[in-house]
């Protein structure tokens, strides 16, 4: 996709795992990209905003050509709930963007988001999508599979298992299928979507080049690290208990209720929906390629 004219983009969650990459990609193409966040970042332009505060969101989006919402909450803590961020907060951003005359709104969700889910996290993501579409009909909803790259939670967790751990626990029997997607591919896709600014909206599911079982992901990391440990199946009911106990740790929880819910079924892009190629990423990376780059050195 061509770069096109410079645009002014406000990125909510611009200091986070994905938001930083989105801003970098936009700046590389000569756009003005501003992080909308509660705390001033060390570098770059920013606007103070809290998506639970409509007035601050309205001020943050003023004058923007495009708005990207990368804000997420994985553990309810500090008085914030999943509904506060993923439903009410997402609606606030969408309404402010609409009122400000923004032409492009990109909302980050995730594969598996389902308003009818019994999981509070998964349900909130699904209801958040509905709230965004109700407020901004032509919003683009992007649903990545598990993202992998610098500072991620998935690859880093697999690579960082303590050496003294005698075995690696699997989710169930490890057969659940994943389609890990490169963080850089997702950030580039968002930049391309901003530059295209077609305003057509729609839902996109973003998966990487390869579909692997969770067991295969673990084995890939072990091979790259040159160490093998037994893989031990752990029933999903056991993981649910672990997540419940870990939740007491707040944001530092190593496993969350939402992760367990999503790992109970395949997390693979729906082939009936447009994906990375439709957003200009014609040759997406696979998990092996990304893992090899960060762990094989």
Image (spheres, grey):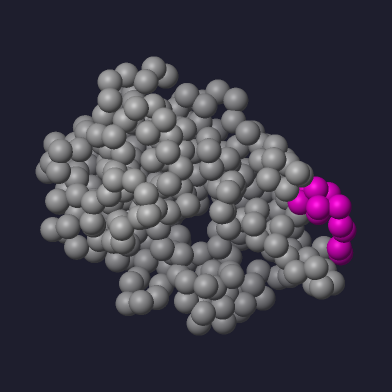
Stretch in magenta? 219-230
> Quick check: 97 above or below 247?
above
Q: Quadrant of residue 61?
A: top left
Q: Is residue 240 magenta?
A: no
Image quadrant holding the N terminus, namely top left
In the current view of this chain or complex, which residue is farthest to the front?
42
Residue toward you, 30 or 196 = 30
Residue toward you, 67 or 139 = 67
> Residue at position x 14%, y 51% from top?
59
Q: Quadrant of residue 116?
A: bottom left
Q: Is residue 222 magenta?
A: yes
Residue toward you, 1 or 26 = 26
> Quick check: 284 above or below 93?
above
Q: Quadrant of residue 193?
A: top left
Q: Position of residue 75 (x, y in %)?
A: 45, 70
> Residue at position x 58%, y 49% from top?
150
């Amino acid at each position: 996709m061509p770069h096109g004219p410079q645009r002014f983009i406000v990125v909510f969650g611009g200091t986070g795992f994905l938001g930083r990459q989105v801003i970098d990609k936009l700046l590389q193409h000569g756009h003005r990209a501003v992080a909308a966040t509660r705390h001033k970042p060390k570098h770059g332009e920013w606007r103070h905003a809290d998506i639970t505060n409509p007035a601050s969101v309205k001020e943050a989006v003023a004058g923007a050509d495009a708005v990207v919402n990368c804000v997420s909450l994985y553990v309810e803590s500090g008085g914030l709930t999943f509904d506060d961020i993923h439903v009410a907060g997402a609606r606030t951003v969408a309404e402010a963007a609409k009122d400000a005359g923004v032409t492009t709104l990109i909302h980050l969700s995730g594969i598996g988001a389902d308003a009818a889910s019994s999981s509070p996290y998964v349900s909130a993501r699904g209801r958040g999508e509905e709230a965004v579409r109700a407020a901004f009909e032509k919003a683009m909803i992007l649903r990545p599979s598990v993202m992998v790259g610098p500072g991620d939670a998935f690859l880093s967790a697999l690579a960082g298992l303590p050496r003294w751990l005698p075995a690696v626990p699997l989710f169930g029997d490890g057969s659940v299928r994943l389609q890990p997607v490169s963080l850089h591919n997702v950030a580039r896709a968002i930049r391309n979507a901003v530059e295209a600014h077609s305003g057509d909206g729609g839902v996109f599911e973003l998966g990487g080049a390869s579909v692997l079982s969770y067991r295969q992901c673990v084995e890939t990391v072990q091979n790259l690290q040159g160490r093998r440990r037994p893989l031990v199946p752990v029933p999903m009911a056991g993981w649910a208990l672990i997540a419940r106990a870990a939740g007491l740790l707040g944001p530092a929880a190593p496993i969350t209720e939402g992760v367990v819910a999503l790992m109970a079924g395949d997390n693979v892009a729906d082939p009936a929906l447009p994906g990375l190629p439709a957003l200009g990423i014609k040759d997406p990376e696979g998990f092996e390629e990304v893992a090899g780059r960060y762990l094989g050195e």
